[in-house]
Image (cartoon, rainbow, N blue to C red):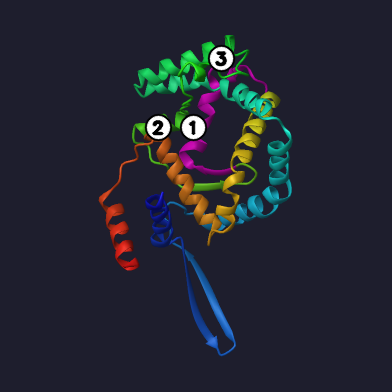
């Protein structure tokens, strides 16, 4: 755990998300020029404005209170049932995406989960497949592109929706082409997205303090999101580069 914390801190300190250069024009006046230097985030000025809207207003006054109410007052079996039902719709597209990556065992797992949970699990409300040893691992089409070397692309913070990488924006629509997602109306798809997002926001309640105490919450979330995207593409086995090792060694030497 300590090693992971050091990696997170080092990535924040050494990546150089923003550099503030101060030039004193007079004794009582300071001019500050902010330069954004992260090549992964060429739209950082716009993204930070959208982050402030999402984090300081939308989440603080709407999403957070609703998520806490959902977490505190809805019984756990009901929350699990709603989450299982909404995620069950994604199993067929996950089956196809795993086939496209040549991950035959995970493709069979997705197909088995959908069959078992839709039938024995009453349309997916109960995760019977999990009880039978079939773990939930859902791949989207963006992961397929990443598997074949398509880069993440620039980071983008969307108002209301949160963080994306460009590869996701360009490819997320593909998953909606497969049954049963293709059969949902616009409003049904919006309801599914809303319930899934609400559950994910409630799951993040325990990490609120970590974010609130970050020196730069925007940069913290951005780094975490890139790690999350890479984690999904590599199924948890993200390769480390020599440059990463050198940065970590350099940071450790500074601590000593």
Residue at the spot of label 2 = 145
Identified at 49% across, 25% down, the residue is 136
Q: Going by the picture, which residue comes out furthest to the top? A: 119
Q: Residues within 10 Å of mark 3 (few under 14, many from 20)?
A: many
| Magenta segment boundaries in residue numbering | 162-185
Is residue 171 part of the magenta span, yes or no? yes
Give whichever of 55, 130 is nearer the camera. Answer: 130
Identified at 62% across, 40% down, the residue is 201
Please provide percent x and percent y for residue 117. Answer: 56, 14
> Element under label 1?
helix
Drawn side of residue 143 relative to residue 179, left or right:
left
Identified at 32% across, 62% down, the residue is 252
Q: Going by the picture, which residue comes out furthest to the bottom? A: 27
> Element under label 3?
helix
Quarter of the C terminus within the rendering: bottom left
Q: Which of marks 3 and 2 is in front?
A: 3
Identified at 37% across, 52% down, the residue is 3
Comes first in the chain, label 2 or label 1: 2
Is residue 146 part of the magenta span, yes or no? no
Considering only vertical position in the picture, is 228 above or below 97? Answer: below
Q: Distance between the residues labelled 3 and 2?
A: 28 Å
Q: Are marks 2 and 1 in contact (CB under 8 Å)?
A: yes
Drawn side of residue 187 relative to residue 30, left or right:
right
Residue at the spot of label 1 = 171
Q: Distance between the residues labelled 2 and 1?
A: 9 Å
Residue at the spot of label 3 = 117
Q: Do the residues labelled 3 and 2 touch (CB within 8 Å)?
A: no
Give whichever of 140, 228 is nearer the camera. Answer: 228
Q: Which of marks 1 and 3 is in front?
A: 3
Comes first in the chain, label 1 or label 3: 3
């Amino acid at each position: 755990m300590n090693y992971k914390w050091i990696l997170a801190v080092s990535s924040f300190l050494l990546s150089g998300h923003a550099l503030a250069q101060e030039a004193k024009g007079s004794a009582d006046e300071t001019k500050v020029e902010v330069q954004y230097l992260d090549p992964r985030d060429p739209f950082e000025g716009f993204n930070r404005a959208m982050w402030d809207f999402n984090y300081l207003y939308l989440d603080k006054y709407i999403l957070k209170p609703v998520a806490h109410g959902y977490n505190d007052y809805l019984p756990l079996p009901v929350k699990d049932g709603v989450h299982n039902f909404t995620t069950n719709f994604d199993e067929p597209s996950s089956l196809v995406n795993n086939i496209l990556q040549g991950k035959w065992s995970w493709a069979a797992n997705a197909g088995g989960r959908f069959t078992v949970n839709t039938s024995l699990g009453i349309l997916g409300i109960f995760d019977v497949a999990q009880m039978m040893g079939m773990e939930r691992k859902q791949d989207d089409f963006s992961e397929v592109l990443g598997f074949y070397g398509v880069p993440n692309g620039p980071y983008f913070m969307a108002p209301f929706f949160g963080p994306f990488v460009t590869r996701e924006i360009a490819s997320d629509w593909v998953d909606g082409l497969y049954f049963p997602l293709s059969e949902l109306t616009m409003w049904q798809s919006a309801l599914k997205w809303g319930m899934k997002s609400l559950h994910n926001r409630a799951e993040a309640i325990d990490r609120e303090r970590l974010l609130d105490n970050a020196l730069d919450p925007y940069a913290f979330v951005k780094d975490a999101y890139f790690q999350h995207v890479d984690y999904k593409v590599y199924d948890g086995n993200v390769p480390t580069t020599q440059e990463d090792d050198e940065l970590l060694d350099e940071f450790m030497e500074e601590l000593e």
